[in-house]
Image (cartoon, rainbow, N blue to C red):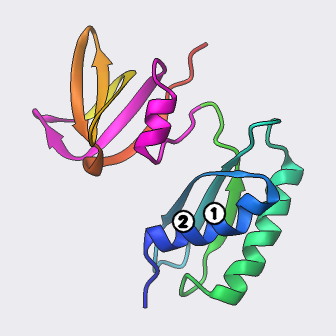
Amino acid sequence: MPTTQSHLTALTRAAIEPLGYELVGVEHLGSGSPHAVVRVYIDRSDAEITLHDCEQVSRQLSAVFDVEDPISGHYDLEVSSPGLDRPLFTLEQMVRFRGHCARIKLCKPLDGRRNFEGQLAGADGELLMLEIDGEVYKLPVDQIASARLVPQF
């Protein structure tokens, strides 16, 4: 039985939170292909993520995934900090970064477009509010294919 994204996320969260890390999100890319990747983004509130942190989480997840076997076939496990162009996986994360610039890609077009870039302006129920040039767009959260912060220098 194939693993659902929510099951993989829950399994990962249960494995790493006791170590003191926040799970930002999990991506399962290329499912069923010979080059499948499970990418796990971690963070912590008290310090920057180091290579040692990524190694520790990778060892923990490898052990848990070996026992639970949540993914069929071969895959590469990657553990990373979210970086400057932090991916946003949940509405709560998008609201947390209110006021920051983000790039949002929708699964299907809304008003003739799929790609949006603007300032995160909060939420209205299950709609993400994104301000672009003074206009507020309401994007359905269930239609968001990807969301990332845009680094500002």
**Observer-nearest residue: 86 or 64?**
64
| Position in image of residue 128 (x %, y %) | 31, 34
* Residue 9 tag number: 2
Residue at the extreme right of the image, as rendered: 52
| Position in image of residue 90 (x %, y %) | 44, 46
Q: Are marks 2 and 1 in contact (CB under 8 Å)?
A: yes
* Residue 90 tag number: none
Evaluate whether residue 94 shows in this view: yes
Secondary element at tag 1: helix
> For the magenta stretch, what is the residue range?
85-114
Q: Residues within 10 Å of mark 2 (few under 14, many from 20)?
A: some
Circle 1 is placed at which residue position? 13
Task: Name the amino acid, label 2.
Answer: Thr
Position of the N terminus, as image quadrant, is bottom left
Residue at the spot 43% in from the left edge and 27% down from the top edge: 102
Evaluate whether residue 30 shows in this view: no
